Image: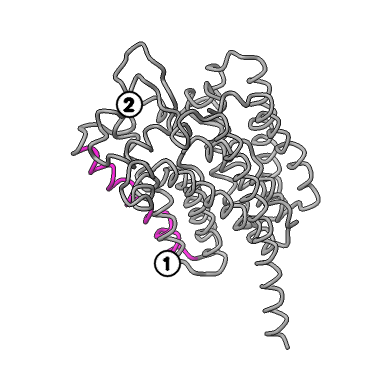
């Protein structure tokens, strides 16, 4: 009887996770189709290619980061002359490699493969967040807040690394919740090769494992992804003669939120403060209070701690580009949802009211996408 009840409960969790994933899959496809209507070059426009790099025109257009993913997926190692910072771009190697594999190396298919991977990855992340929230006895609709987050959807439409990164990272969180620690480490290694932001999730899981007395596993959870990450750095140091630390994207701020000094648009500054800075401060204070009063470290709070710290010291170049800030800040969205869902479930509606209005930027600034 107890086995039957457990099985029914598991099916219910899976059902709601699949529902939310399907909703975001459908919504993402609609956004892609709408964007394609204005795309002169079809799926290739999602890469936002600039002539500075594609045509070596010093006075041309700059484009956006997705173009480097596209070049690597299309040309592999031969893409180096088209890359603005090879060690930085090749550091995030998994997504372009997967795009190359899915497209069977056919250049014409690569743009479509990159879109398909991100659409699937984004909806998968939504489903996994929903499943994790249900496992934490939190509201099921909380996963949709992430699914509709402007920064995550922008990453889908810009051929960027974040959707795949956090699909793998959330897979690691689910594996950890189920005690599958070896799978957790493998998924974290893959997520880190997609983008280094996954190290924040690894740090949170390792912190929780350490406090829970699993110190051996804590070392492996943090050390496995870090070892792979720095080993890959070593390869790039030999290959390119440089490391990503030389680029502005790797220069963290000493003063909390000091990167805001790079933002001079008052409207953008207000939105960044409302959607990122204020939630980071509030979640930090509430998290510290919870830790002090309860004398316990739940999984969601362990994940939240590295995420809030990262937002406070994000590089100035990130704050200067709000589109980048909203997608780079995805860790605070995910961990904030998990923490509030687990420790303050009645306040989940507050996060929805705070972050869901970001969808309006698709209407107000539709011309920025293609």
Which label's residue is closer to the chain start, 1 or 2?
Answer: 2
User: In the rendered view, how is the structure colored?
Assistant: one colour
Measured from the top left, where is residue 69 in percent x and y? 38, 38
| Magenta residue span | 214-237
Residue lying at 32% horizontally and 26% vertically, measured from the top left: 84
Residue at the location (63% across, 57% down)?
A: 298
Cα–Cα span, label 1 and label 2: 36 Å
Q: Residue furthest bottom?
A: 1
Q: Is residue 4 above or below residue 280?
A: below
The secondary structure type at the circle numbered 2 is: loop
Q: Is residue 218 magenta?
A: yes
| Callout 1 secondary element | helix
Horizontal relation, residue 249 to residue 24: left or right: left
Mark 2, Cα crowd under 10 Å, few <14 / some 14-19 / many 20+, is: few
Nearer-the-camera pick, 274 or 107? 107
Residue at image coords 49%, 69%: 180
Mark 1 or 2: the one toward you: 2
Q: From the viewer's perspective, is residue 328 above or below residue 254? A: below
For this orientation, the residue located farthest to the top is 59
* Residue that numbered label 1 is attached to: 182
Give the quarter of the figure containing the N terminus: bottom right
**Residue matched to label 2:** 84
Q: Main secondary structure of the magenta part?
A: helix
Q: CB of mark 1 within 8 Å of CB of mark 2?
A: no
Residue 163 pos. (x, y %): 51, 46
Q: Residues within 10 Å of mark 1 (few under 14, many from 20)?
A: some
Side of 155 where 18 appears, left or right = right
In reply to whether residue 294 is colored magenta, the answer given is no
Residue 195, percent from left and from top: 42, 43
Residue ranking furthest to the right? 346
């Amino acid at each position: 009887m107890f086995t039957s009840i457990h099985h029914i409960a598991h099916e219910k969790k899976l059902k709601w996770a699949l529902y939310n994933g399907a909703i975001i899959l459908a919504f993402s496809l609609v956004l892609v189709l709408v964007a394609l209507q204005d795309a002169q070059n079809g799926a290739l426009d999602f890469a936002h290619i600039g002539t500075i790099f594609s045509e070596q025109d010093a006075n041309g257009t700059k484009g956006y980061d997705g173009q480097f993913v596209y070049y690597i997926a299309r040309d592999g190692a031969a893409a180096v002359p088209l890359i603005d910072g090879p060690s930085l771009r090749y550091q995030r190697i998994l997504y372009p490699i997967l795009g190359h594999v899915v497209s069977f190396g056919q250049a014409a298919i690569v743009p479509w493969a990159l879109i398909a991977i991100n659409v699937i990855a984004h909806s998968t992340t939504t489903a996994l967040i929903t499943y994790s929230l249900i496992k934490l006895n939190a509201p099921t609709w909380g996963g949709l807040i992430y699914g509709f987050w402007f920064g995550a959807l922008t990453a889908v439409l810009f051929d960027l690394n974040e959707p795949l990164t956090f699909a793998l990272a959330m897979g690691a969180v689910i594996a950890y919740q189920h005690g599958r620690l070896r799978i957790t480490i493998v998924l974290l290694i893959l997520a880190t090769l997609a983008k280094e932001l996954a190290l924040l999730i690894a740090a949170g899981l390792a912190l929780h494992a350490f406090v829970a007395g699993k110190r051996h596993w804590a070392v492996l959870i943090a050390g496995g992804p870090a070892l792979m990450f720095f080993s890959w750095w070593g390869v790039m140091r030999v290959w390119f003669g440089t490391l990503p630390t030389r680029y502005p994207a790797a220069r963290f701020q000493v003063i909390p939120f000091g990167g805001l000094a790079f933002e001079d648009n008052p409207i953008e500054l207000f939105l960044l403060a409302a959607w990122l800075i204020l939630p980071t401060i509030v979640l930090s204070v509430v998290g510290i209070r919870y830790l002090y009063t309860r004398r316990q470290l739940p999984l969601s709070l362990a994940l939240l701690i590295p995420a809030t710290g990262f937002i406070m010291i994000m590089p100035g170049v990130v704050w200067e580009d709000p589109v980048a800030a909203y997608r780079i800040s995805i860790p605070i969205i995910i961990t904030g949802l998990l923490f509030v869902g687990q420790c303050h479930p009645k306040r989940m509606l507050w996060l929805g009211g705070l972050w869901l209005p970001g969808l309006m930027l698709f209407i107000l600034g539709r011309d920025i996408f293609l």
